[in-house]
Image (tube, rainbow, N blue to C red):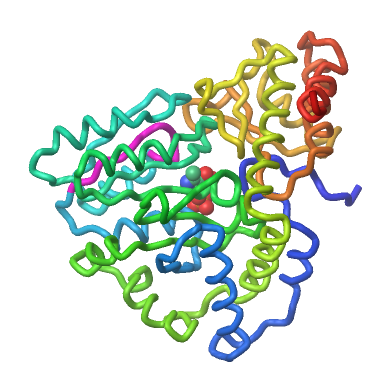
């Protein structure tokens, strides 16, 4: 059957029809007025989603490329940063930094745990010589389904009086959960197109504060394609130093319009309620959540696999019988957990389809749960009580 699958991995996400149609427009010149206007509109819309007056740079890259771009622009070999390491993606930032000759002070947490403000405050307090140039952390660690309390963390960092910049990976949290770039004083926010923004993969997006620009001007790291100063210069006329993926910009403008029509606060509230329904139905079925209680993500839920259920069997059954695509465990979590992405284009009704299919597939694989448990827990979450 050619019907679309339920793509419930934590990105790339499902794309609204309006966005899909806009992506199909004829190619335009990347040096013409039509594209320049499109870029200007996209940057204006992104500023609203980022809640910032800072510069917004758009890069033809995936999220990892955008993260690497931040490292090569902000720092010089030999610089020191503090980096949270709580899963594959936060550890990736630390690895990228090391590859570029930085000293990385890792703040390591067991996967599934969130990083807490006092842990960062301690590292900064120990750095009496103010060698640490930035604190890097993810808002949402997609590996473990943990959302850090970015507001509290940024406030604590400010209170220490340490001059380190704050660099946040918001690849799987932008347009899913509250992020106040300016109000919380986040210097660098890195994200991508294929998650909360409901677009195909292909764009990295970075916001850069005035304080970050000061560091960027001092950076001796070699670069050209990623050079923020070159990119910013060309963006003055809404152009790029190279050929950008023009078609995605049509989609970006449309996706930003969809978000604006719904209202950012409503987008966050929808993600929150849907995440609660996924968690409640999982727990009602006797399944264990992997993320630390109180720090569960609103964009992805990580569920421990019941004993005797193999991930491959669950994945195949869900795909073949229910048209549902789920995510598996990464690295050491392979075979231990499964991940349900519920970010971007998702409606309350989808949760019934997703979680009832999970319930039926688990029962078929020998797990014992009364049929209808998931649906009941979902309705109880959605009903006014
Ligand atoms: C939090 C986070 N950071 C970084 C990345 C890497 O992004 P990409 O796969 O687009 O390079 C991902 C991808 O899932 C992610 O979830």
Left or right of residue 360, residue 92 in this image:
left
| Residue 199 among those drawn in magenta | no
- Farthest-out residue, front: 385
Q: Quadrant of residue 27?
A: bottom right
Q: Position of residue 291 (x, y in %)?
A: 53, 24
The quarter in which the C terminus is drawn is top right
Location of residue 268 with respect to 319 vertically, above or below:
below
Location of residue 201 with respect to 355 vertically, above or below:
below
- Farthest-out residue, left: 129
Q: Residue placed at 14% from the left, 52% from the top?
A: 78
Q: Position of residue 257 (x, y in %)?
A: 69, 65
Q: Residue placed at 80% from the left, 10% from the top?
A: 369
| Residue 87 among those drawn in magenta | yes
Left or right of residue 357, residue 42 in this image:
left
Q: Quadrant of residue 160?
A: top left
Q: Quadrant of residue 117?
A: top left
Q: Residue placed at 23% from the left, 65% from the top?
A: 214
The foreground one among 241 and 159 is 159
Left or right of residue 261, residue 132 in this image:
left
Q: Which residues are magenta?
A: 80-90
Left or right of residue 22, residue 84 in this image:
left
Q: Position of residue 28 (x, y in %)?
A: 65, 85
The foreground one among 86 and 163 is 163
Q: Residue placed at 55% from the left, 27% from the top?
A: 334
Q: Position of residue 336 (x, y in %)?
A: 57, 21
């Amino acid at each position: 059957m050619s019907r679309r699958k339920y793509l419930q991995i934590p990105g790339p996400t499902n794309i609204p029809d309006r966005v899909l149609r806009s992506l199909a427009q004829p190619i335009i010149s990347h040096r013409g007025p039509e594209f320049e206007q499109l870029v200007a509109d996209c940057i204006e819309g992104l500023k609203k989603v980022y809640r910032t007056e800072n510069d917004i740079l758009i890069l033809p890259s995936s999220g990892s490329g955008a993260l690497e771009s931040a490292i090569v622009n902000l720092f010089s070999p030999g610089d020191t940063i503090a980096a949270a390491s709580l899963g594959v993606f936060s550890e990736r930032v630390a690895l990228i930094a090391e590859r570029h000759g930085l000293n990385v002070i890792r703040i390591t947490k067991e996967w599934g745990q969130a990083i807490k403000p006092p842990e960062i405050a301690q590292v900064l307090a120990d750095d009496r010589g103010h060698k640490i140039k930035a604190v890097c952390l993810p808002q949402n660690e997609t590996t473990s389904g943990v959302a850090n309390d970015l507001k509290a963390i940024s406030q604590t960092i400010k209170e220490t009086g340490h001059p380190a910049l704050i660099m946040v990976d918001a690849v799987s949290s932008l347009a899913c959960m509250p992020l106040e770039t300016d109000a919380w004083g986040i210097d660098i926010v890195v994200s991508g197109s294929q998650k909360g923004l409901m677009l195909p993969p292909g764009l990295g997006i970075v916001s850069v504060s005035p304080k970050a620009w000061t560091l960027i001007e001092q950076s001796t790291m070699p670069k050209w394609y990623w050079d923020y100063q070159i990119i910013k210069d060309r963006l003055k006329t809404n152009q790029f130093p190279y050929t950008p993926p023009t078609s995605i910009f049509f989609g970006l403008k449309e996706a930003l319009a969809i978000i604006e029509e719904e209202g950012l606060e409503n987008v966050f509230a929808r993600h929150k309620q849907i995440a609660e329904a996924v968690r409640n139905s999982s727990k009602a079925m006797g399944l264990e959540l992997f993320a630390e209680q109180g720090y569960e993500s609103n964009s992805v839920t990580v569920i421990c696999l019941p004993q005797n259920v193999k991930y491959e069997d669950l994945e195949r059954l869900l795909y073949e019988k229910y048209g549902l695509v789920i995510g598996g465990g990464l690295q050491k979590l392979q075979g231990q957990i499964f991940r349900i992405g519920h970010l971007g284009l998702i409606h309350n009704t989808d949760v019934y389809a997703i979680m009832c299919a999970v319930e039926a597939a688990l029962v078929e694989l020998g797990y014992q749960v009364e049929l209808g448990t998931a649906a009941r827990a979902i309705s109880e979450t959605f009903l006014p009580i």
